[in-house]
Image (cartoon, rainbow, N blue to C red):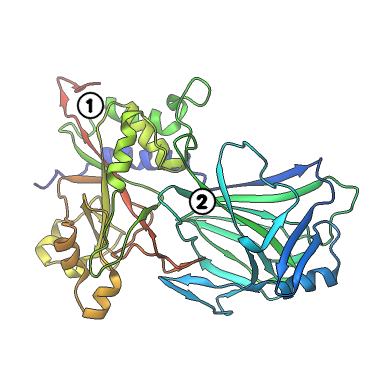
């Protein structure tokens, strides 16, 4: 069934919804932590020749050169492969079993699950090109980086999520004096945020990396309670409520699709051509029972809470895309701006949805010259839903394979998936939308 064309007032209202949701987006946060009670903060590490101790605040150039020698060259993940390529990543690191601190930088009982993953040292010329962190588990939220005191210049951390960008500069021209309270700059970002480290031009850039996880008591997003924010105070909620109550907008109702801003980690295997063990849909939908959105990040959680608070049943769907050139002319002629991705005749992608999040292995298509579209249709039953109106497209796509191209580690057990939330909008009867 083909839905009716979108009118100009409806187009304006839908664009307002997307703009309002964007105001809830914060894909990273940063700050500085003070440690007044830490006595002689020290990094302890082991090398092939024995154990060493490094004063975090008073390290000499020789101490840092010794540390450099004690670290190993940093690899990175390219698909499922572990790669050593200094042109892409030039850094050194201590593995988690080979170092420790005489204090806990993130404190105790802070309300998050954090696992230290590495100590990273980048010297002059060191860098790490654009990548996203490899998902470690289904409940992997993101990454926390903490900068240790050392003189360096350059090495800015660049973050990008969709069309939003940020730059974090921890460079400093001096080391911290003994008398000062220890202060450590930090940054947190969601795991699917693309980031890079620009070349260090002088000195030594030292950082600690932590993987951050959600649990039943630790959420991506704290839902509306009397002790936190009220959903009604969110701009998107107000805009969406006005949309529902306007009888001139989509008077016949229909199915609205909201693509999520973030991709989410998922346990998966990789037999060709099908990726198995995908249970994200049921896991996300289980959260409806208690009104939480513990698997969703930031603006996605605001969207989910708004839809459920509006007493709308939410369906969770996998989203795939394929170029329009793999379709016949009749299909292409049916597409409009609310059923395809991108604008203009040269850069359009068809949106397909499926209940199956498993996707296909894109490498299988290359190896055996099989079309992604045919495999998506046959393996996961992905299809165009012509009656769906795409209010917001997903900001990121795993076209076929859900494995990240470049990560800080090889993608083996977990991968990212693209998600949409679908709702059935009631029609307008006697001047009022049913239920509102």
Above or below for 373 versus 73:
above
Looking at this view, is 396 or 97 the one in front? 97
Quarter of image, res 52: bottom right
Secondary structure under tag 2 reads strand
Q: Position of residue 247 (x, y in %)?
A: 22, 26
Q: Position of residue 393 (x, y in %)?
A: 32, 51
Q: Residues within 10 Å of mark 1 (few under 14, many from 20)?
A: some
Q: Which residue is mark 1?
A: 247
Task: Select label 2 or label 1 by which is in front.
Answer: 2
Above or below for 58 versus 185:
below
Q: Which residue is mark 2?
A: 142
Above or below for 435 versus 318:
above
* Mark earlier in primary sequence (2, 1): 2
The CA span between labels 2 and 1 is 41 Å
Which residue is situated farthest in the right direction here? 179
Q: Residue shown at 43%/27% (left/top)?
A: 231
């Amino acid at each position: 069934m083909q839905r009716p064309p979108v009118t100009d007032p409806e187009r304006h209202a839908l664009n307002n919804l997307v703009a309002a949701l964007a105001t809830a987006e914060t894909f990273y946060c940063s700050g500085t932590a003070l440690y007044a009670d830490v006595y002689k903060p020290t990094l302890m590490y082991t090398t092939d020749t024995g154990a060493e101790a490094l004063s975090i605040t008073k390290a000499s150039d020789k101490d840092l050169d010794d540390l450099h020698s004690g670290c190993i060259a940093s690899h990175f993940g390219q698909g499922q492969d572990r790669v050593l390529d200094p042109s892409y990543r030039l850094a050194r690191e201590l593995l988690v079993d080979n170092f420790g601190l005489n204090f806990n930088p993130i404190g105790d009982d802070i309300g998050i699950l954090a696992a230290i993953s590495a100590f990273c040292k980048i010297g002059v010329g060191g860098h790490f090109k654009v990548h996203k962190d490899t998902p470690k588990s289904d409940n992997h939220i993101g990454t926390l980086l903490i900068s240790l005191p050392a003189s360096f210049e350059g090495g800015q951390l660049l973050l990008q999520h969709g069309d939003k960008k940020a730059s974090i500069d921890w460079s400093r021209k001096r080391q911290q004096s003994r008398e000062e309270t220890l202060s450590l700059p930090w940054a947190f970002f969601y795991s699917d945020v693309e980031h890079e480290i620009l070349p260090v031009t002088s000195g030594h850039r030292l950082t600690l990396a932590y993987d951050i996880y959600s649990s039943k008591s630790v959420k991506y997003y704290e839902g509306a309670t009397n002790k936190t924010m009220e959903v009604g105070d969110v701009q998107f909620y107000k805009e969406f409520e006005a949309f529902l109550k306007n009888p001139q907008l989509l008077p016949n109702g229909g199915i609205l699709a909201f693509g999520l801003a973030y991709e989410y980690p998922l346990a998966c295997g990789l037999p060709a051509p099908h990726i198995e063990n995908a249970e994200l849909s049921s896991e996300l939908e289980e959260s409806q029972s208690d009104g939480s959105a513990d698997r969703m990040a930031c603006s996605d959680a605001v969207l989910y809470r708004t839809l459920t608070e509006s007493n709308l049943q939410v369906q969770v769907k996998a989203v795939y895309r394929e170029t329009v050139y793999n379709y016949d002319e009749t299909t292409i002629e049916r597409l409009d701006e609310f059923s395809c991705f991108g604008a203009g005749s040269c850069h359009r992608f068809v949106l397909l949805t499926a209940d199956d999040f498993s996707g296909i292995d894109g490498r299988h298509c290359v190896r055996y010259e099989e079309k992604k579209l045919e495999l998506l249709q046959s393996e996961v039953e992905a299809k165009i839903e012509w009656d769906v109106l795409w209010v917001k497209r997903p900001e990121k796509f795993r076209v076929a394979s859900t494995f990240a191209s470049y990560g800080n580690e090889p993608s083996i057990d977990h991968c990212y998936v693209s998600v949409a939330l679908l709702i059935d909008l009631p029609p307008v009867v006697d001047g009022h939308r049913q239920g509102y």
